[in-house]
């Protein structure tokens, strides 16, 4: 039989991913959401082939368009926003006007999914909530995202990833015991994790609709998404004690921590099982450790006093080794270890590019940008990137002509009434200055463009 | 609607009714389950990403069989400080949702592999975490199982994935949470800024299982996309999740920033790269989280804390992005001097009172500074919000007794996820499974 890794190399070949079928082809999503939590749920659907139409206010747009790390733009766009909103159609309509509502209601007739993350109650007040949309299209799947949920006494409280981390308890866990040194989880992961849960709920609703014909309303609270990932509650209910902060040590395995090496690098090393621990003890030339009564049995080894002793042994050994040597030994002797990867390593490591979990993407408007690939590789219907984020209102013509059957004259009328619009001169909203939109066939969809 | 609830909305009126209607609409009782026709086999070993993925399928109604050798999955002993109830670790209890338990030793016993293959022929989903190629070597990998069952979705979890030369070289490196966190870029972004003492400046591990939970969630998301494709075409496929991708692939920032900045970010402690103020501060009796990042929110916060004289300082009014660290730390301390004067409750009330007036006034520019008392997980359990939303559930294991889990992580009006029972008994469902699937 063919070697396993040559078989899988063909099965997953990233070069062929763009020719494979898309699981969500034909699913149309209206995405009213902004910032990260809602948009990421919509983007995941777009990555698997859904047609996601992102609706934004003309000349204002998503609050997150100009929100860049340390205020650094890339080609007049927000570099991280390309990951959050790729593969979408960008339509810019003014929700306040009657004519816009008419457009939105017409679009809702053929939509499969609606996603919003306004403050609870706002979508209904504006006439674009589940109550209204489900009357137009009874089979709609309507996802409302919020920090505390659509009902309950805290429902109207505004929130961000920070507040969800604070309300679930996650925030207090990242840091050192008996000190005030603790930190929120970085990169708004309190939006991304619940965003993935929200997308999962929509996928389940799509599966259910295919079986029964029924749509439904989904209420995703980001705090509850984070809470699903904490066994700390169960620990407390069983022991009446808190796990608390344990610094760089994972108290569920031993050794398991982030260590400093002889060449002043940082690495994580862990032994989750007796077998891995035996391999580790052999690798460091201390095979007797795996028969030491304090360490031989996993639960015995995890007891705080024994864990501490073993942790110290690991600290001393790793401090005497180079990072590369530890990783090499781990590969050979089968115990888990990994260098602490930073932005630069992740962007540049060759294996990630080959795997497709980091991608150098060639975009028609922006040129080359390194972006993250999917966190799950599917052999049959892979996630893929088709285009990056676009300037505000970039797909106005395409969406209105192709999906709603409007004519150029209709669109010009809407533009005149300021029902639809585009960007102003602010970075994050406008295209790169060197890019000539008048020659772009998608921006000018259905019009003659000079080459 | 209570006065508190009025604070942040200008669309009052039917608010209270809406809450009641929604709570009723989201009641899970008697509702259909999405995956009630789906069989999932979880043979993952010492890997909570696999266990979490299996749990999520089970919460949406799939029949999930956890398959382990008779001594049990080593994951049962992966538990904080070695705490167990009758030998079962806390995380395993937490994830023991709606599952069946069967004993098969597919690593060592060829006849058990045959039994497994028989089950896999009837399954929609297989989840495994052995070394890449190991199941294949035993004759029960994706290739062999899919030949018998073309609709099979085969989810494989590992450190470096199932393909590429790196995956081959490091095939035998097991996947754990902390190595997944480190290898996929989370700890590099967390820790004290460079001017503070070691070890606080070191890269810091996330205090939850960020690696394993992100991998598990990614696996079930990919698996559900595959289920939709299977529903449409009958075709199965393989889903490959690598722990070393988890964090970086989910949030996306590390790859793009590493490329556009051509260097790694420093660690900046409690500060944020985009928003300010956006973090937590010490107060008289604990900590509060404060989010007031938009200009009008920031101005409102200055007023609330009696810091209005700072408003016309050029450093803070228009440029609060902490790219000049000393400046941001300086402002952080100015705010801290004030927050230390009040209790958490007082600060929350001060912000609420301001916001309430602000939301109804055209003069105050709509500034809404958000202040919240920081909660530990234990404190969060007592919050009425989660009681009303049934976010925590007391469950009872036949042998281990009663305990609490967080559940109902999303409310759905037609086919919500739910926890029907918890269990953990090794081989507890052997007979049930043999009768139902193996004609014994």
Image: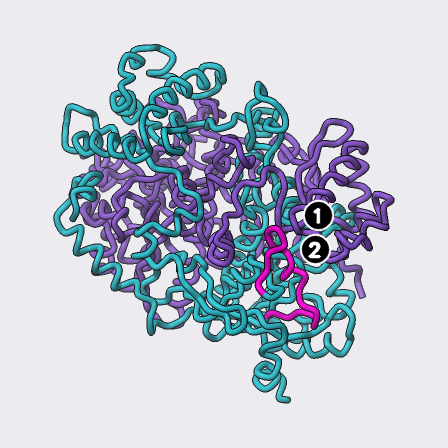
Chain colours: A purple, B cyan
Q: For numbered disc 2, what is the local secondary structure?
A: helix
Residue nearest the viewer, comparing B199 with A293: A293
The disc placed on residue B215 is: none
Query: What residue did someone put label 1 on?
Result: A306
Q: Residues within 10 Å of mark 2 (few under 14, many from 20)?
A: some
Check the image and report above or below for A242 versus B324: below
Check the image and report above or below for B404 versus A259: below
Say which residue appears at 62% left-offset and 38% top-offset. Answer: A248
Residue nearest the viewer, comparing B199 with B54: B199
Q: Which quadrant of the figure has residue B194?
A: top right
Query: What residue did someone put label 2 on?
Result: A300
Furthest-left residue in this view: B13
Taking the image as shown, residue B423 lies to the left or right of residue A429, namely: right
| Any part of residue B405 in sight | yes
Name the subunit of mark 2.
Answer: A
**Labels 1 & 2 near each other (Cβ < 8 A):** yes
Q: Which quadrant of the figure has residue B83?
A: bottom right
| Any part of residue A26 in sight | no
Q: Is residue B76 shown in magenta?
A: yes
Furthest-bottom residue in this view: B440
Check the image and report above or below for B293 versus A197: above
Check the image and report above or below for A299 versus B196: below
Q: For numbered disc 1, what is the local secondary structure?
A: helix
């Amino acid at each position: 039989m063919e070697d396993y890794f040559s078989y899988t190399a063909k099965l997953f070949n990233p070069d062929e991913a763009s020719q494979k079928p898309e699981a969500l082809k034909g699913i149309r999503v209206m995405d009213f959401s902004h910032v990260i939590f809602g948009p990421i749920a919509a983007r995941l659907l777009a990555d698997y082939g859904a047609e996601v139409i992102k609706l934004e206010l003309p000349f204002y747009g998503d609050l997150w368009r100009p929100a860049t790390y340390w205020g650094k733009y890339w080609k007049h766009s927000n570099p991280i926003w390309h990951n959050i909103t790729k593969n979408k159609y960008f339509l810019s309509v003014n929700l306040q006007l009657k004519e816009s509502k008419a457009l939105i209601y017409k679009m809702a007739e053929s939509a499969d999914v609606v996603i919003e993350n306004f403050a609870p109650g706002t979508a209904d007040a504006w006439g674009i909530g589940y109550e209204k949309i489900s009357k137009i299209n009874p089979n709609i799947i309507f996802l409302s995202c919020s920090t505390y949920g659509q009902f309950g006494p805290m429902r109207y409280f505004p929130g961000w990833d920070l507040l969800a981390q604070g309300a679930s308890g996650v925030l207090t866990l990242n840091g050192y015991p008996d000190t005030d040194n603790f930190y929120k989880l970085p990169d708004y992961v309190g939006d991304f994790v619940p965003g993935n849960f929200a997308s999962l709920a929509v996928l389940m609703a799509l599966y259910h609709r295919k079986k029964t014909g029924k749509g439904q309303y989904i209420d995703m609270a980001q705090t509850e998404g984070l809470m699903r990932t904490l066994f700390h509650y169960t620990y407390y209910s069983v022991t009446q004690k808190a796990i608390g902060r344990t610094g760089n040590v994972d108290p569920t395995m031993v050794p398991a921590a982030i260590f400093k090496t002889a060449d002043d690098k940082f690495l994580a090393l862990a032994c989750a099982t007796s077998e891995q621990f035996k391999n580790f003890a052999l690798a460091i030339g201390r095979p007797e450790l795996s028969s030491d009564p304090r360490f031989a049995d996993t639960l015995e080894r995890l007891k705080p006093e024994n864990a501490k002793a073993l942790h110290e042994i690991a600290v001393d050994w790793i401090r005497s080794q180079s990072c590369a040597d530890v990783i090499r030994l781990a590969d050979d002797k089968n115990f888990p270890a990994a260098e602490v990867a930073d932005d630069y390593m992740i962007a540049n490591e060759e294996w990630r590019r080959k795997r497709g979990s980091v991608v150098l993407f060639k975009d028609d408007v922006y040129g080359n940008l390194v972006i993250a690939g999917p966190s799950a590789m599917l052999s049959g219907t892979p996630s893929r990137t088709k285009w990056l984020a676009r300037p505000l209102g970039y797909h106005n013509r395409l969406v209105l002509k192709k999906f709603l059957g409007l004519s150029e004259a209709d669109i010009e009328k809407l533009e005149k009434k300021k029902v639809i619009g585009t960007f102003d001169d602010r970075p994050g909203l406008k295209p790169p200055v060197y890019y000539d939109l008048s020659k772009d066939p998608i921006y000018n969809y259905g019009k003659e463009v000079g080459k | 609607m209570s006065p508190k609830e009025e604070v942040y909305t200008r669309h009052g009126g039917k608010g209270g009714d809406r809450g009641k209607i929604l709570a009723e609409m989201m009641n899970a009782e008697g509702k259909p389950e999405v995956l009630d026709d789906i069989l999932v086999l979880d043979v993952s070993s010492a890997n909570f990403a696999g266990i979490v993925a299996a749990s999520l399928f089970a919460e949406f109604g799939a029949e999930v069989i956890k398959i382990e050798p008779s001594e049990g999955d080593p994951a049962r002993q992966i538990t904080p400080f070695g705490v167990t109830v009758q030998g079962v670790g806390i995380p395993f209890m937490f994830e023991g949702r709606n599952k069946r338990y069967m004993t098969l030793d597919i690593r060592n016993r060829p006849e058990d592999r045959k039994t497994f293959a028989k089950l896999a022929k009837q399954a929609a989903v297989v989840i495994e975490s052995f070394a890449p190629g190991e199941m294949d070597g035993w004759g029960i990998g994706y290739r062999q199982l899919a030949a018998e069952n073309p609709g099979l979705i085969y989810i494989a979890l590992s450190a470096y994935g199932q393909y590429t030369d790196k995956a081959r070289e490091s095939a035998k490196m097991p996947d754990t949470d902390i190595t997944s966190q480190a290898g996929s870029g989370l700890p590099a972004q967390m820790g004290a800024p460079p001017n503070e003492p070691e070890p606080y400046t070191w890269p810091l591990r996330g205090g939850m299982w960020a690696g394993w939970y992100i991998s598990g969630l990614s696996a079930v998301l990919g698996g559900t996309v595959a289920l939709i494709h299977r529903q449409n075409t009958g075709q199965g496929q393989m889903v490959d999740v690598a722990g070393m991708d988890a964090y970086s692939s989910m949030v996306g920032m590390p790859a793009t920033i590493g490329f556009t900045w051509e260097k790694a970010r420093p660690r900046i402690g409690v500060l944020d790269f985009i928003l300010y103020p956006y973090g937590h501060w010490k107060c008289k009796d604990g900590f509060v989280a404060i989010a007031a990042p938009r200009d009008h929110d920031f101005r409102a916060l200055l007023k609330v804390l009696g810091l209005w004289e700072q408003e016309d300082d050029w450093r803070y009014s228009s440029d609060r992005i902490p790219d000049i660290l000393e400046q941001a730390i300086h402002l952080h301390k100015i705010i801290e001097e004030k927050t230390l004067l009040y209790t958490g409750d007082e600060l929350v009330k001060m912000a609420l009172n301001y916001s309430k007036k602000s939301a109804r006034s055209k003069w105050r520019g709509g500034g809404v500074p958000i202040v919240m008392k920081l909660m530990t997980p234990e404190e969060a359990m007592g919050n009425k919000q989660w009681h009303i939303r049934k976010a925590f559930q007391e469950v009872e294991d036949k042998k281990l007794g009663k305990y609490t889990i967080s559940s109902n992580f999303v409310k759905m009006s037609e086919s919500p996820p739910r926890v029907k029972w918890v269990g953990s008994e090794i081989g507890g469902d052997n007979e049930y499974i043999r009768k139902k699937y193996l004609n014994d």
